[in-house]
Amino acid sequence: MVKWTLEEVNERLKAGRIGVTVCQRGDRLSLRGTFPAKPGIDKPPYQQYLALGCYANPAGLQYAESEAKKVGGLLAQKQFTWSDYLEEPLTPVGDAQSWVKKFEVDYYNRKGRTPTTETTWKSDYLPAWQLLERELTPTTIIAAAGKTTANTRKRKRVCEKLLALAKFAGITVDLKPYLGTYGSSETFFTQHRVFRLDWFLQISFLYYF
């Protein structure tokens, strides 16, 4: 008897070497695979989502598996084109807070609700997302990152959480230029040199005075 669960569907797709998986984002299903870049984007094929719009229920999973096989075949034959799928926006644009609420449901479904996960949610995730404007778009995500001080631990953590929400919502945004150098070897050695200089000046002061 065929089972219609996300795990079973992906096991069958893996066994068939389809090259595409079914993912659940919020209460909807998407396909994930290595797709050609969308029109207007100049880069080689990379991992992307293809939103199906169907709910994550047995009927939706049946449809998603069928679409995965179809899309996998097109990709294998290098015949996949976004024009067949771009009539409906593949990058959901909507109210930021509605996506935050969907992410919250998914977060606790995956992590469980405990004092630790609640603290992480309130102290790590929410502060970053409170920087967002009303709509969730690449522009508002970049603007939210820019509200923090560059090359700081806070900027790095905010960017990480903004990227997590963007990925969940199926939005492609590049925050690498905004991550800064916090935690990098460059930052470490710069701080180390400053410390050495400060130490040298203190010793010199004690010796001469």
Image (cartoon, helix red, strand yellow):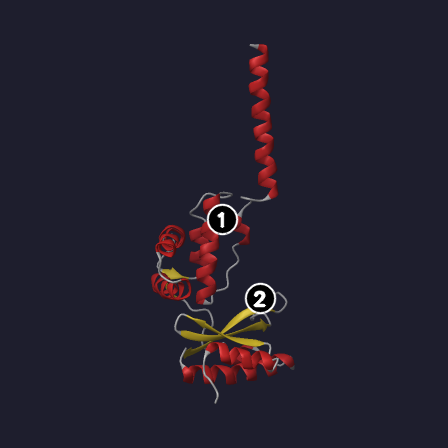
The location of residue 63, given as percent across then percent down, is: 46, 84
The mark total stands at 2
Q: On the picture, is 128 further left or further right than 197?
A: left
Crowd tier of the residue under label 1, counting other residues whose Cα lies within 10 Å: few below 14, some 14–19, many 20 or above: many
**Image disc number at residue 190:** none
Q: Amino acid at mark 2?
A: Ile
Q: Residue at x 53, y 78 (%)?
A: 10
> In front here: 22 or 76?
22
Crowd tier of the residue under label 2, counting other residues whose Cα lies within 10 Å: few below 14, some 14–19, many 20 or above: few
> In front here: 209 or 129?
209
Q: Residue at x 48, y 44 (%)?
A: 153
Dot 1 falls on a residue whose secondary structure is helix
Residue located beneath label 1 in the image: 156
The location of residue 62, given as percent across then percent down, is: 46, 85
Residue located beneath label 2 in the image: 41
Q: Amino acid at mark 1?
A: Lys
Q: Residue at x 42, y 65 (%)?
A: 110
Q: Residue furthest top?
A: 209
Distance from label 2 to label 1 (Cα)?
26 Å
